[in-house]
Every structure is written in C-alpha cells, then in structure tokens.
Image: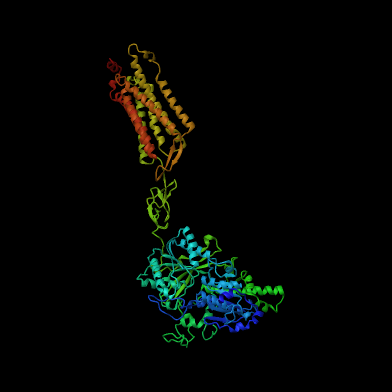
C-alpha cells in the first residue's frame, strides 16, 4: 500500500510540506538499525548490502541446517562504508572543491533483499524516522544523488522507486542486462562497459589455450542472459563447454534439503569434469556460495584433493562470507584469476581505517556489529555478548585481522565508491560555478546550490572529468559508463585464512584490439596441484607436431583424435586441422613435423655411376678408333675391300661418335648440351644404321645380280650406298630440324618426381618429336634387320648379313627394353639408362659386325687373301 501510494505521487515542495505537519507527526518511527548518518549541506544517500537477515534464508553449515542469530554481518563489505566516509572527509577538508559547502551522507543497508531495498529507497525520500515519502518536511536533507550497491537485482529494485523521482544514481557495479529506458535514464555506472570484460575473459582463455571449460552462473536475469548471449560468442572463437551449471538459489528453510540436493549434483559435475578452468559469473555475494563447494564435496564423500579448478571470476564478485564460514578453508581459491575494475591504493586510507574506534563513532550503526563479528567479541550488552563471554575493548587493531575477515588494502568496489563521491563533488563544483557565472551571485551561491533538485545534478554528473588523488583520470562515456579498464587479479591464499590479490595483468579497452589484454604469466601463482606449471584445460591431449586433428563423432569440436599426417605432408604446430604440403623445393622429414631442403641432383662426373659410364664410353670409343685404324691400315686387303670400305669407314666413324655422344648426357644440363643430346644421338645412330642398311643392300644386290636373267645387273657397279645413307640421314635431319625449330629441348628442374631431390634435367620440349626421332631410328633398324635376315644364307666369305642380323637383333633388343625402362625410372637414372642403351647398342654393332673381321685381319691373316676367297667361292 505504501509503495503504490508513493509511485502515484510526487515529492512536495517545502511550503506544502508545512501544511502537512499532522501526517508527519502521526507516522510511526522507522527503525534506525544499521544506518550511518552524517549531516552536511549536501546529502549523499548510500544503499549498500552489509548484513544478511536470516529470516529470509536458511543457508547454514552442512550437513544439517543450524539456526543463527537474525543478523549475519559480512565484515568484508564494511570497507565500502569506510570508502564513502573517507571520500567525504577528504572533500570536506579540501576548500578547493566545494568551498563553504559540506557533504553529508545517509547510508542504509539493503540486506541483499528486495523488500529492504524498497524500504531504504523510501526512507531516503521521507522525513527522518517517518516512512511518508510524499510528505518530506526536511527538504534540505533530501539526498542529491544515491550510490547503489554492487548487486544487480537490488540495483533494479532501487531504480524502480528512485527513477520515479528522477533521483540520479551512481552504481558501483556492472549494469544489469535487463533494464528499461526510464530506469537507466538517471543512472551512471561506476563500472566499465561489461562487454570489455567478456572480451577480456575470452582473450584470457585463448591466451592460456583453455578451450575446454566449465561455467557456473547465478540463476538470475543477468546470469541467464550471460549464458544465452555471451557463451555462444565464446563458442564461435573455439571455446567448448564441458558443463554449464547454475549455483543453487538461497532459499527458505523449508526448501533447504532441495537446495542441498541441487548443490550436491552441481558439485559432482564440477569434481567429475575434465575441464580445469571454470568461469564463475556471479555477484558480490557469490563467493559465499562458492565456499560451500568443499563442504558439499565432503558431505558427498567426494575428494577435492588435487581436483581443484582454476576459477575465473567476473569483476562483480568480491570476497564475502557468512560468519559461520570464518574458519572454513579457502585454499580452493588459491591460483584463481578474477577481473576487477582498475583500482589503486589511496594515500591515507589505511590510516583512516585504523583510526576507526566504536567508542568514537556514535552515528555509525554498522561499526559495532562489524567490530563484534570481526574480533569475535561483544560489547557490554547482553543482547550482543558472545557465547565465550569475550568482551570488546574497542582498542582492537583492525590491521591484525586476516584478509578473509577484513582487507585493509582498498578493493575495487571501494575504489569505485570513492570515485563516485568525487564525481558528485566535481559535478556540484561545476554546478556551483555555473550558477556564479550566470547569476553573478557570489553571496547566494551556497543557498542556490543546496536548493537544487536532484534531477538538476544529473545534467552535470555525465560531464565530469578529473584526476583523483591516485593520479588517475575519471570520466564517463556517452552511455553513462565509466571510462576505465579492468585489472586481472591472481588470488594467493595462506594457511592463516588470509589471502593476497596480486595484479598480474590488465584489460585496457582504449588500446588496439590485439594489445588490450596484457598478462604476466611469470607472476601468476597456480593451484598447488599443478606444481606451479600452467594448468591445461583441454578435452584431450594436444595433437603433437606430425599429427592432425580428426573430429570425434557426437562430441564437441574441442574433442578430437590425433592422426599421423599422410606421407609427404607435415604439421609443424600442435592441433592443426590439416597437414600441409612442403614447398616444391623441400620435402617432409621422417617425423613429418618440418620440411628439409631438397638436394639438386644430376648425373655428374664426380659420382661412381657417372665415372663408370664415362669410362665405358671412352673405352668403347678407343676400341672403335682402334678398329678404324686397323681397317685403314689394311684397307687394301681383300676382306676390307669385299665389305665396301667407304661404308665401313663411315660406320666406324659414327660408332665412334655415338660412344662419344654419350658423354653429352653426363654433367649438369646446360642450354647447349640440352640442344645437342637427343638430336646428336638421333642423327649419329641414324647414319650408322643407314650405313648398315646400305652395306646389306649392296651385298644382297650383288648376289641377286649373279642369277641368270636377273634385272639387278644394271644396278651393279653404281654407287648405291651413298644415296641410301644420305636419304636416311636427310629424313632424320629434317625431323630434328623441325624439333629444334618448334619446341627445342631446354634446361629444366623437376621438383616432383623425387621426394628428396630436385632433378636438374633437360626438358625434351616436344615429347612427340623425341619419339619421332626414336621411331625413325627404330624403323631403320627393323628394315636393316629384315634385309640382313633375308641375306643370311649367302656365302660366308662375302656375306656380312649373318653378323648384321645378329647385331641388329642386339640393337633392337636394347632399344625395345630401353623404352619401358626409361619411362619407369626417374631423375639421373633416366640418363643412365639412355647412356647404357647407347653404349650397349653401339657395342653390339661394333662387336657383332667387326670382331670377326678384326679376328681374321690380326689373327688369321692367311684367310685374308684373294686365293682363299676364290677357293672358298669355287
């Protein structure tokens, strides 16, 4: 009823308030428990969560719930109040900011409860100790701005009321993901853009290669929106999720068993997960729930030894705990990483904390509760005396408290509150200066400023820009969010339940995208189970170099098998999706993790094969030259004359050249040698075979002419050998000329035929022309073989046909075997095959045709006589 009446009304001005004295006087007094008032010309309202009220929850130590006192102070959050009071104290003592104007504040406790938040919001709009927001009689005590707590749900509840009165709000927590324009209109976030934090978390995961993670979130609108909107963006960047679970809700005592059962299931999933990195998306009180994890695991007989995770916590979270959790182990947080709004230690803050004494601070309704809980004692009051009877002296040292009870160094949230007070002070300063300049009313400036309505202050808040006492600039973006970055904090715990938050990196949204995240890996303390080695968080082991990933069916894309790279391919990085081929001038090593340069190879004179072939070529050349000399020396003998001396000399000369042309195939290919190799080979062997054909044809013609009535007699005595040799050579020369004119051979490299070698070779240019040369040479050989075969029965003394037949049989056999052998070999061995064929076929011709004649000339000279030839012929 009160809420509906308030939403339907407006705040009355002072004159109307005077007429409403009766309603003001009949209102019941409001409770003043857990408030902190300080008077001033300009009042600041703070709605902060400092104390839990157990009437709304039953979240106690396991295994069975226990009833505690109604008040559960969270001593860690008392620093927020001190940060506000410290900032106000500094401003009031500084005449440069608000001269002749003092700041005051009213701090209310929201108890992490919607109902208490609504009540606190109405109290700051009502007369002191009167819950009548429409009849506020002490207008000068109306707050000019409200500083809201860090819980997103409570910020929304607070905005529901305050937005109706256009009350500016400075929120020291992240902006809720669900809000409306009216609620956001008068809100300024002392918190950077939340998307930058999520980008930082993503970059952090990718930096450490944690692609297999778990996620814990609160079951609220912000948590649900995080799962629906942010996690899909993570998945697009290669992050997989082993589990996405919510924390159990803080429920009423009647649902405690269900909450424990739900929490036990979640713990089983966390402990059983293979993901070592877990993102925790929560609020400032979430660590209280996280501290239940070891207890729930113990209750369910689940060992946490060596199975703790690397927690990655959002900046909204902070260390908080219930009083009954004070002695609980916090080592599960050791090595955790959390984001925090960038902050610095402020000079004088720790001294201000140490000066706090409950005997000196009478208006602080939080201090006595904090003191009793922090030092586990009680003031002389039966209602607050502890069971052990220990009394508080008020002289206890705050600096002696462990960090799990109270942190002396300024936290990120406290730093934001401190900046929020200065933002208001600078806005009021600007507002005051504007009034002085516009109205030239120096004497009335104080009254004008204090009479301004809260919504008028809003206009100046968003334009504030200044450097705080730590030397850092404070300003807002156009959307009302603070221009600031995030610190990356490493949590280090100690056996005495204390902990240290070490800054190990930053997330600077103003930097280029590739340089926004800065992380100092060497300064990070990892969980104890990792032995200070960076933990891994993968679905399976990385695929090592030399292997590639192969997706597992039915599993997330982060889960895969590792298969070795196929032959000839490599993977030089871990977790490659596919193997790579080496460049053409390189080949894969045996491990298939790198490429080695290929060696250039060709048939050279410096290797055994080249030496052997060159030696054979020279040997046969010498033999041929020797035979030619023998025939020249005995040119007038019957056996030389009987076998056509001219053709014999030409044949021996070209056999000599054929052996020497084999040397063109040895050595590094050059342009000249490539042009001469095949053409010289084709021409030389064509002349040699055409000589054999001519010799055979002349012999056949001579014996055919001796037959009675033969028509061949007219051809006897005519020079038939020369035309045959010339015409055959001309045809081959024509083929070679066309080849050289159209597509001549040229030096080339072959990088594909051999795995580990680059072959320096002569590209034949036109393969068709190359085989035409070989084909014509083969045709001559076949014709020669056929003619010789037909003349094989002629008398021995004048007949070379039998020897020519055998020599051509050897020649054809060599070159018929050459073709498949040549095509099946690669690199320098192709040249070796062709050289061997040249030498073998030439040696066959030389040996089969001339060795019988040399034998007669040198060893049986008595047979080399005209009488012997005539006797044999008769």
Q: How many marks?
A: 0
Q: Residue 286: x percent and y percent? A: 46, 71
- Report whether residue 800 is seen: no
Task: Decide which of 169, 557 is in the foreground and name it.
Answer: 169
Query: Taking 597 as reference, is 403 above or below it?
Result: below
- Residue that sits furthest to the front in the current view: 1
Q: Residue 659: x percent and y percent? A: 38, 32
Quarter of the C terminus within the rendering? top left
Tell whether 66 sits left or right of 465: left
- Residue that sits furthest to the right in the current view: 440
Task: Decide which of 403, 179 is in the foreground and name it.
Answer: 179
Tell whether 220 sits left or right of 447: left
Q: How is the image coloured?
A: rainbow
Tell whether 450 sits left or right of 744: right
Q: Residue 364: x percent and y percent? A: 54, 82
Q: Residue 267: x percent and y percent? A: 39, 68
Query: Taking 739 as reference, is 593 above or below it?
Result: below
- Report whether residue 340 is seen: yes
Task: Decide which of 698, 814 is in the foreground and name it.
Answer: 814
Task: Decide which of 565, 584 is in the foreground and name it.
Answer: 565
| Identity of the residue drawn at 43% across and 86% down | 390
Q: Which picture quadrant has residue 725?
A: top left
Quarter of the N terminus within the rendering? bottom right
């Amino acid at each position: 009823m009160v809420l509906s009446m308030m939403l339907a009304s407006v705040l009355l001005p002072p004159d109307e308030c005077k007429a409403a004295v009766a309603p003001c006087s009949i209102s019941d007094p409001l409770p003043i428990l857990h408030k902190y008032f300080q008077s001033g010309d300009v009042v600041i309202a703070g709605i902060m969560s400092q104390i839990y009220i157990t009437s709304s929850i039953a979240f106690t130590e396991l295994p069975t719930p226990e009833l505690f006192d109604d008040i559960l102070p969270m001593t860690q959050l008392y620093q927020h109040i001190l940060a506000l009071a410290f900032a106000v104290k500094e401003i009031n003592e500084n005449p440069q900011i608000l001269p002749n104007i003092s700041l005051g504040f009213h701090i209310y406790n929201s108890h992490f409860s919607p109902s208490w938040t609504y009540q606190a919001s109405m109290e700051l709009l009502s007369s002191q100790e009167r819950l009548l927001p429409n009849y506020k009689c002490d207008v000068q005590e109306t707050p000019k701005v409200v500083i809201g707590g860090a819980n997103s749900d409570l910020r929304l509840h607070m905005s529901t009321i305050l937005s109706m009165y256009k009350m500016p709000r400075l929120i020291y927590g992240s902006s809720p993901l669900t809000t409306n324009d009216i609620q956001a209109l008068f809100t300024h976030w002392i918190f950077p853009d939340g998307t930058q934090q999520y980008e930082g978390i993503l970059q952090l995961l990718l930096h450490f290669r944690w692609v297999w993670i778990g996620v814990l979130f609160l079951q609220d609108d912000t948590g649900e929106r995080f799962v629906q909107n942010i996690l899909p963006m993570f998945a697009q960047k290669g992050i997989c999720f082993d589990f996405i679970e919510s924390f159990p809700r803080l429920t009423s005592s009647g649902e405690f068993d269900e909450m424990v059962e739900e929490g036990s299931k979640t713990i089983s999933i966390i402990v059983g997960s293979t993901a070592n990195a877990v993102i925790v998306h929560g609020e400032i009180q979430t660590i209280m729930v996280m501290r239940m994890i070891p207890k729930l695991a113990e209750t369910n007989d689940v060992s946490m030894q060596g199975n703790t995770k690397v927690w990655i916590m959002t900046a909204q979270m902070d260390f908080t705990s219930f009083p009954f959790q004070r002695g609980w182990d916090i080592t599960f947080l050791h090595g955790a990483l959390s984001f925090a709004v960038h902050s610095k230690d402020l000079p004088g803050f720790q001294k201000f904390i140490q000066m706090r004494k409950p005997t000196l601070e009478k208006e602080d309704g939080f201090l006595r509760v904090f003191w009793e809980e922090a030092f586990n004692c009680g003031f002389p009051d039966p209602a607050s005396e502890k069971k052990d009877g220990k009394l508080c002296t008020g002289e206890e040292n705050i600096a002696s408290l462990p960090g799990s009870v109270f942190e002396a160094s300024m936290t990120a949230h406290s730093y934001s509150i401190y900046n929020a007070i200065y933002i208001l002070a600078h806005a009021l300063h600007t507002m005051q200066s504007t009034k002085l300049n516009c109205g030239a009313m120096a004497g009335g400036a104080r009254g004008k400023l204090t009479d301004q309505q809260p919504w008028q202050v809003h206009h100046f808040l968003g334009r504030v820009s200044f450097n705080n006492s730590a030397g850092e600039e404070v300003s807002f973006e156009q959307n009302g969010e603070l221009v600031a970055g995030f610190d990356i904090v490493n949590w280090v715990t100690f056996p005495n339940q204390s902990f240290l938050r070490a800054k190990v990196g930053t997330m600077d949204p103003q930097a280029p995208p590739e340089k926004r995240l800065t992380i100092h890996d060497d300064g990070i303390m990892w969980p104890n189970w990792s032995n200070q080695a960076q933990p891994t968080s993968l679905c399976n082991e990385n695929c090592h170099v030399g292997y590639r990933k192969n997706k597992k069916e039915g599993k997330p894309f982060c889960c895969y098998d590792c298969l070795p790279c196929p032959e000839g391919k490599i993977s030089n990085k871990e977790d490659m999706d596919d193997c790579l081929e080496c460049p053409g001038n390189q080949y894969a090593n045996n491990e298939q993790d790198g490429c080695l340069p290929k060696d250039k190879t060709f048939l050279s004179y410096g290797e055994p094969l080249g030496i052997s072939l060159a030696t054979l070529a020279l040997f046969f050349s010498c033999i041929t030259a020797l035979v030619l000399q023998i025939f020249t020396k005995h040119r007038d003998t019957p056996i030389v004359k009987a076998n056509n001396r001219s053709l014999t000399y030409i044949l021996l000369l070209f056999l000599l050249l054929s052996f020497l042309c084999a040397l063109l195939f040895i050595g590094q290919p050059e342009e000249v040698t490539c042009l001469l190799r095949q053409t010289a080979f084709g021409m030389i062997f064509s002349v040699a075979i055409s000589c054999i054909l001519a010799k055979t044809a002349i012999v056949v013609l001579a014996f055919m002419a001796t037959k009675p009535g033969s028509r061949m007699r007219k051809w006897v005595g005519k020079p038939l050998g020369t035309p045959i040799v010339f015409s055959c050579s001309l045809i081959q020369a024509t083929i070679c000329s066309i080849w050289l004119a159209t597509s001549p051979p040229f030096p080339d490299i072959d990088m594909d035929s051999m795995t580990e070698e680059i072959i320096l070779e002569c590209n034949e240019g036109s393969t068709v022309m190359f085989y035409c040369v070989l084909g014509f040479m083969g045709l001559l050989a076949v014709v020669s073989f056929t003619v010789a075969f037909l003349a094989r029965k002629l008398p021995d003394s004048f007949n070379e046909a039998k020897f020519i037949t055998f020599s051509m049989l050897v020649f054809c056999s060599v070159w018929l075997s050459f073709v498949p052998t040549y095509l099946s070999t690669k690199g320098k061995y192709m040249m070796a095959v062709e050289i061997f064929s040249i030498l073998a076929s030439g040696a066959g011709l030389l040996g089969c045709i001339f060795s019988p004649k040399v034998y007669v000339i040198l060893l049986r000279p008595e047979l080399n006589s005209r009488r012997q030839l005539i006797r044999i012929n008769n």
